[in-house]
Amino acid sequence: MADYSALAALIALTLAYHCWREFRSDNPRDARLLGGSALIFLATGAGLLLQ
C-alpha cells in the first residue's frame, strides 16, 4: 500500500500549494476548502502507510 500512500501525499501536496495560492489571493473560503481536502488526503496517506 506504500505506492498508494505516495500518491495520496502527492495529491495532498498539490492541494496544499493551491490552498496557499488562494489564501495569498485573498480568497479565504476556497483556501479553507482546499486546506481541509489536503488534510483528508494526508490522513488517508498515513492510514494507507500504516496498514
Image (spheres, rainbow, N blue to C red):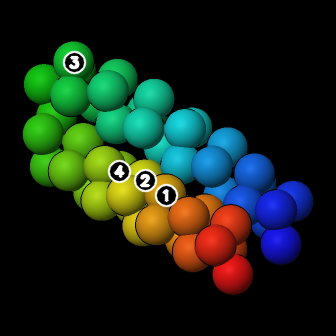
Closer to viewer: mark 4 or mark 2: 2
Amino acid type assigned to the residue bearing label 2 in the image: Ala
Residue carrying label 1? 42
Real-space Cα distance between discs 2 and 3?
17 Å
Residue carrying label 3? 24
Amino acid type assigned to the residue bearing label 3 in the image: Arg
Residue carrying label 2? 38
The single residue placed furthest to the bottom in the displayed view is 51
Classify 10 Å Cα crowding around label 1: few (below 14), some (14-19), many (20 and above).
many
Real-space Cα distance between discs 1 and 2?
6 Å
Amino acid type assigned to the residue bearing label 4 in the image: Leu
Residue carrying label 4? 34
Which residue shows up at 13% across the image and 25% down it? Answer: 26
Which residue shows up at 67% across the image and 43% down it? Answer: 10
- Residue 2: where, in percent of width, then height? 82, 62
Of labels 3 and 4, earlier in sequence is 3
For the question of whether residue 30 can be seen, the reply is no
Image quadrant holding the C terminus, namely bottom right
Of labels 3 and 1, earlier in sequence is 3
Residues marked 1 and 2 touching at CB (< 8 Å): yes
For the question of whether residue 25 can be seen, the reply is yes
Indicate the secondary structure of the residue bearing disc 2.
helix
Identify whether 36 is placed above or below 44: above
Indicate the secondary structure of the residue bearing disc 3.
helix
Which residue shows up at 24% across the image and 42% down it? Answer: 31
